[in-house]
């Protein structure tokens, strides 16, 4: 019988190594965790406390003025609604296109599988560049439309390869043959058998795609100039730029501190507002994350 870890006698070197390793991990945790705590605490503090640098770990002079100031911008609500639309619609289209491409390519008997995979992977190495992409979207009539944030990024080849590898590893050919003997076609087999067995990889892909859409900035910056269509990230950028205050130009030091503190408070509040949705979503996806990502990326 195998001995439990607690019953194994460790040497002095092993104990030192484990202690040293734990200290390094603890230090890394603090380096990652402290900025998050600082931003949240600053967003819940008063403008004067933020400007004077009194916020170190916990909120000072608790205040919600930063969040109130954020939502006083009517464009924020419009940016939120646009980003939610881009994220939900774009992720659904991404998952549909990825699964429809990955499942057939995971079957050994698919004719022309090698050529199709070559064409897919070729686009990962070579692309047309920004100007040809802009001209293409312009000729297709996608500029200044919601579709320009969704259609050009309808599928990620990297994510498709992960999904294809997952299907190859977890959906055996014998299962497909058994379903075909019972009169099940490929589409019905995909909907009734493959999707229920692929929840881990679907959860991982949904997280990858949704985070990408939520943080989408560059495409909106290039292809959109109608403020009504701007996603949240563009609105946040505009607010941060407009609220950059040069405190040295203000004669009254108290007023300068208050103005600068409000600008800094607004920045911290914006960071928290834009990050909260995925802070709540991730715990529900994390149980599938490791299994789906490792199985899809390593096996096969």
Image (cartoon, grey):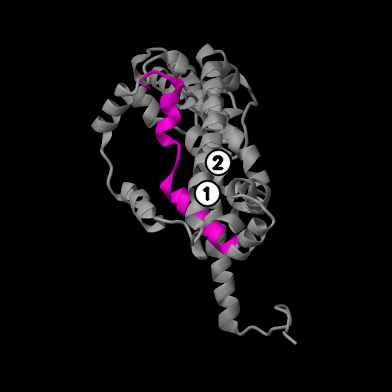
Q: Is residue 92 above or below residue 109?
A: above
Q: Residue at x 53, y 16 (%)?
A: 78
Residue 294 appears in view: no
Residue 143: x percent and y percent? 36, 20
Q: Main secondary structure of the magenta part?
A: helix
* Residue position marked by numbered label 2 in the rendering: 36
* Label 1, residues with CA under 10 Å away: few <14, some 14-19, many ≥20: few
The x, y position of residue 76, in whole percent, is: 53, 18
Q: Please state which of residues 22 and 194 is positioned toward the viewer in this rendering.
A: 194
CB atoms at circles 2 and 1 under 8 Å apart? Answer: yes
Magenta part of the protein: which range?
142-171
Q: Position of residue 170 (x, y in %)?
A: 60, 61
- The answer to if 165 sits in the magenta stretch is yes
Is residue 149 a member of the stretch shown in magenta? yes
Q: Residues within 10 Å of mark 2 (few under 14, many from 20)?
A: some
From this viewpoint, is residue 167 visible? yes
Q: Is residue 120 left or right of residue 195?
A: left
* Front-most of residues 131 and 57: 131
Quote the CA–CA distance across marks 2 and 1. Answer: 7 Å
Disc 2 element: helix
Badge number at residue 32? 1
């Amino acid at each position: 019988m195998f001995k439990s870890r607690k019953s194994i006698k460790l040497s002095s070197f092993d104990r030192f190594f484990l202690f040293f390793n734990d200290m390094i991990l603890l230090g890394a945790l603090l380096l990652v965790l402290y900025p998050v705590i600082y931003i949240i605490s600053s967003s819940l503090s008063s403008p004067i406390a933020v400007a004077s640098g009194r916020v170190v770990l916990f909120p000072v002079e608790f205040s919600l003025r930063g969040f109130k100031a954020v939502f006083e911008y009517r464009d924020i609500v419009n940016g939120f609604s646009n980003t939610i639309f881009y994220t939900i619609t774009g992720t659904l289209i991404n998952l549909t296109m990825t699964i429809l491409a990955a499942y057939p390519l995971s079957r050994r008997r698919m004719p022309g599988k090698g050529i199709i995979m070559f064409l897919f992977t070729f686009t990962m190495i070579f692309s047309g560049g920004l100007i040809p992409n802009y001209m293409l979207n312009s000729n297709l009539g996608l500029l200044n439309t919601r579709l320009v944030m969704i259609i050009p990024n309808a599928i990620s080849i990297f994510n498709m390869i992960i999904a294809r590898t997952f299907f190859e590893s977890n959906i055996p050919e014998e299962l497909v043959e058994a379903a075909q003997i019972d009169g099940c076609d490929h589409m019905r087999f995909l909907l009734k058998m493959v999707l229920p067995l692929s929840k881990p990889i679907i959860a991982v892909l949904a997280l990858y795609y949704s985070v990408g859409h939520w943080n989408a900035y560059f495409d909106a910056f290039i292809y959109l100039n109608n403020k009504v269509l701007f996603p949240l990230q563009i609105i946040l950028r505009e607010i941060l730029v407009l609220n950059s205050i040069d405190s040295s130009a203000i004669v009254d030091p108290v007023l300068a501190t208050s103005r600068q503190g409000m600008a800094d408070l607004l920045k911290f509040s914006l960071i928290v507002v834009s990050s909260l949705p995925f802070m709540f979503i991730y715990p529900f996806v994390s149980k599938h994350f490791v299994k789906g990502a490792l199985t899809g990326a390593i096996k096969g």
